Amino acid sequence: MGVATAGHRRAIVALAWPVYVELLAGVVAGIIDVAWVAHLGPAPTAAVALATNLENLVLGLVLIAGAGTTVLIAARPTAEGRREAVRGGAALSAVITAAVVGGGLAFRGPVAGMFFGPGDARRDALGYLAISVPGLAVYFGQFMVDSVFKGLGDTRTPMRLAMGANALILVLDPTLIYGLGLGVRGAAIATVTGRAAMLAIAGVVVRRWVGQDRPAEILTAAPAPVASASAVAVLQVPAVATALPRRITARALAASALDVARAGAPLGTDFVVRMAGATALAAVVAGFGVAAVAAYGIGTKAMYFASMAFYAVRQAATIHSARSAPESGRRIGAAVIGVGASVGAVAAVVYAGAAPWIMAAFTGRAEVVSVGVVFLRWLALYLVPMSVVISVSGALAAGRGGNRLPAVTAVGTAVLVLLAHGLAGPFGLPGVWAAMVGSAALQCAALLVLMRVSAGRRP
């Protein structure tokens, strides 16, 4: 049992660290834009910050298609089954992309107006969104390509593509913003161009292998060990993504898309509900003044470095669980809990110990630093159970327990908001931070029970 669990831990860690780098690269892309635009003044900075936050919000929608595609490709042993997963994921992603891009272009004016009055900030936000919203089609396309690679056990190729996009953005931002004088529009063009270039490279990799005569037994091989997953994944991509039947009925395509939606809904819904909870909590914190809002904003941004690690373990747990035999469920569950708790414990020590330095890196205002240090130290109690929650949700999403995951998240988020309102009055901001800890602990306990009940089952 111990040796087998250790093997699963190693497999999860090997899958997770490239995902962590990839996820951080996505966060850094927004930071790069804001950092370069910051020299233009407060209005452009606020406009770009708003646009990048809106992008993170809609990511939860395409996550349904991406996560579902990854789960089904990983779980299905035949090339035909994987082809169906890719067909369904592509169809679902196309619908989501059309809705998001169309809606974003139609309502970008009212959305910008919700945050900015008439003036430079609103004008800059509209200019950035006019380019970044259509560019979401490229972002979502790359996300879906990454999902195929991940389903085949390759998390390193998406990592390399994300790092390549950031390298291009880092070069293009100053060139377009200042060299060509495009301002915030230059930042948007740089981001879209960097992502489009990596999407094109991914397409070249796939076409290169399609043009070669590969043995069918290689293209349809069973999942390989993690050590050789990258090479085998590239060989398998043509089989699952391009060798599609010439005639596909609308009914068959809709059925495949529905399968993907069912598989991805738990993780997509979980993400959206958590984002809504964070927004509701920000509204509670706003009642304590500008310094509290600033400290909460800085703390949550700083927490990205930990939360991205949690979500990396979650993706690794989903991939590894779906690719493993059902009878390995309990051992995988133990491995996921161990990895998640370890990552959370390290994060807790770092944030508690380095709280003053973290806040000082963002602001010199004493009142903001004071509130922020207390918040980050409360996070030490929050991060361990939340790391386990997010990590375990990945293993559950690949099994029968996944359909109960959104309910647990919704109840936990409702408890968070209610506790925050209830404790804020008598205890002030510490009551709000305590609500975060209580909600995380409740969700952790619920998911551990759910993991024990559902281990080893497949949907």
Image (cartoon, helix red, strand yellow):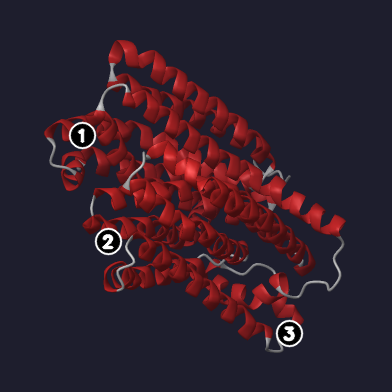
> Quick one: SS at disc 2?
helix
Q: What count of labels does the image hold?
A: 3
- Report the residue marked by disc 2: 36
Q: Mark 1 points at which residue?
A: 373
Residue 328, how many percent across, how many down? 64, 50
* Foreground: disc 2 or disc 3: 2
Q: In this view, does 405 lie to the left or right of 245?
A: left
Which residue is identified by label 3? 215
Q: Between residue 246 and residue 321, name the one nearer to us.
A: 246
The mark that comes first in sequence, 2 or 3, is: 2
In the rendered structure, which disc, 1 or 2, sits on the residue that comes first in sequence?
2
Give the CA separation, mark 1 to mark 2: 28 Å
- Residue 404 visible, this angle: yes
Q: Which of marks 1 and 3 is in front?
A: 1
Which amino acid does the dot numbered 2 rest on? Trp
Q: Name the foreground residue: 129 vs 61.
A: 129
User: Mark 1 to mark 3: distance in Å?
Assistant: 59 Å
Q: Please name the amino acid that badge 1 sits on.
A: Val
